[in-house]
Amino acid sequence: MEVTKNDAPELNIEHFQNLIEQVRDVIFSISPQGLLVSLNKSFEHITGWNVKEWIGKPITDLICEEDIPLASERIASLLNGKTDNAVELRIRKKSGDYFAGEVLATPQMNDGKITGLLGIVRDITQRKQSDALLRKLNRTYALLSEVNRAIIRGRSTQELFDEVCKISVEKGGFRMAWVGLMNPLTGQVTPVSSAGVTGDYLERLQITMSDKERGQGPTATAMRTGSHSVSNDISSDPRMAPWRINALSNGYFSSAVFPFVIETKFMGTLNLYAPVANFFDEEELALFDEMAANISFAMKIANEEVQRKRAETELLVAKDKAEESDRLKTALLLNISHEFRTPLNGILGFGEILTETVNDPKHRKMVNTIVLLGHRLLHTFTSMLKLSQLEAENLKPTYAICNFSELVKEMLVYFKPRADVKSIEIRETIEKDVILTSDKAMLKDILFFLIDNAIKFTHSGCVWITLQKGFENGGEKIEFKVRDTGIGIEKGQLDIIFQAFRQVSEGFGRNYEGTGLGLTLSNRFASLLGGEIQVESELGSGSVFTLVFKTWQILHGSLTTVEQTGINVINSHERINSKTESPVKVLVVEDNEANVELVLLYLGKKFNADIATSGKEAVRCARQNDYDLILMDINLGSDMDGIQATKEIRSMKNYSSVPIIAVTGYSTKEEKERILGQGLDDFLSKPFTVNELLTVISHWIKKPGGG
């Protein structure tokens, strides 16, 4: 179709400007004075400068100072009406760095006059980097030239040196070639490889950089300057005086030395000796310079490979040591836990029994103090063990459905006596049946630490506990708040309270007990469970700690108490024996005399208990008697542990479904899972209370098939 003048579309300036703004290159225009008139948005993207900052400023202010003469010359040439090719200039970014710009400009004409320049700048930094990489690859390929085959064949620098010397003599026609390496401590250059006619020349070299005579020859000069050193006439070169006679007798009439340089360090030299004088010309020297550079590169790669392998070996050794350290640490913690909890079980157990039997007020106070300090010791040890597990990443959540409301109420029952002692009022606003998926043990620890801190740091007034569901950003959330009227925290100390072993008062003059781990563990547990702890505080007025969980963890409905918490509290022995009036027959397997006595006291007259103090004795008792339930300690000494004893007992026909409960000083989740996977039915960690023991027994005695 023929297009007439009237058919041609009208130029849309706005559309044209939009197109310019979309161009990834910088488009600019300058006045005849070299001042910037316009810039597109790509200028901001590439340089980081704001366009408005540069309008009206000289374009040369953006150019590297060393490139300004070239830029000024090109601008002047274009303003005079001459056309020119693109020029490469370094353009300054706002960061102070420069990028390589390919600049092409053309004069702007108006009524036949040049009114400025219109140009385009393309960032060619990436292209130049690619070019540099290509040159580096080409340099690597250059190894395939005169000595590349030797470099490829060589498995070590020594093999490379041997091959280079041999090739130089056989292919290059040299009388002799040798490679020397310099000792950086002594400055002495020692031959490490050679080929050709050597005689005793190398044995008598004795080149030392500091020697007044022998330190001025071609080899030392090349090492000192980093450039090749040539003696095209050994017979007349004064620098060769110390070696002249020996050299000429071996047929060396000219020589050249090429240094090996690795990252500005002079490592050695390649020394070539020709059978005729004036052998070396510029073309050959350039070739051997490249050859020496390639050898230097190969040495660098070889050294890096040696260092890499050494580093890998050291890393593997360090990894093995770290893993062994972790294993030893874990084993130590488990052993400490067991050895700590087992005697503490007797201390706390007998202490609690004495609190109910001692009538003298003074003695009862002493017993209560023993129990209180025992619980404090247990709490301290447990906190440190959990922190260690967290740091070793050995503590992972086990999710189940929990009734948050009931857990909070359970905690308040526990803490109310402590609050009463300090005359602190506990207020509560707890929404019913707040249910979520979480790790119950971790969640209880968080509640314990937050409420414990509030009571500890409050001397008068109240602690207000609230639990409610709410909404945030269109989703549901759960908020558990602990507000107190305690001492409060300075704003400058809010950042340290979640750090391990840190407290508001520290040092010898600290005012409060504790390890400073409660908030640390609470915060880490909350993070593991997908929640967060927020804190607000004012010194002297109190603090508010808020535990928040978001939508995905919240469930709707209600659970029974047993489903929520898994707790079935027993207040007497009557519930144990609902199935029959005859005593429940129990085998207690325990090698600690104090714990045996304590368990017997806990079991009372409603149980008919036999005692086995070793694994073998437990197996023998099981063969001779029919027990309704077995309480099995795990660590029983050297003859047979509790797990081995359990396997022996399980192999008996009448014990396939009899409940066997682990009663042990081990307490970690990993140990519990390991033990329960060995044929035991339940797990009770020492120290335990009478209610905790009877709760577990009641659960299994009433279970169908149990007893």
Image (cartoon, rainbow, N blue to C red):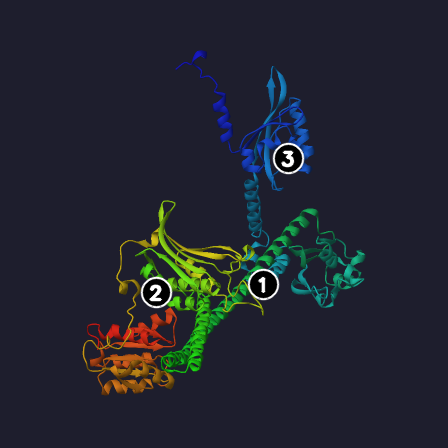
Residue identifier under label 2: 410
Within 10 angstroms of label 2, few (less than 14), some, or many (20 or more) residues? few
Q: Identity of the amino acid at label 1?
A: Glu
Label 2 residue SS: helix
* Disc 2 to disc 1, C-alpha distance: 78 Å
Viewport quadrant of the C terminus: bottom left
Nearer to the camera, 171 or 115: 115
Give the mark, 2 or 3, whose residue is nearer the N terminus.
3
Nearer the observer, 561 or 187: 561
What numbered label is drawn on residue 482? Answer: none
Q: What residue would you read off at disc 3?
A: 62
Residue 557 placement (x, y as % from top left): 27, 55
Compared with 277, 11 (above or below) is above
Q: Secondary structure at mark 1?
A: helix
Q: Is residue 67 left or right of residue 637?
A: right
Quadrant where the N terminus sits is top left
Q: Is residue 312 depicted above or below 556 in this figure? A: below
| Helix, strand or loop at mark 3 | helix
Q: Is residue 669 left or right of residue 544?
A: left
> What numbered label is drawn on residue 159?
1
Are the two marked residues, 2 and 3, in contact with CB atoms closer than 8 angstroms?
Answer: no
Mark yes or no: residue 671 visible: yes
Residue at 79% across, 58% down: 239
The amino acid type of the residue labelled 3 equals: Leu
Tell me where residue 639 appears, x and y as whole percent. Answer: 35, 86
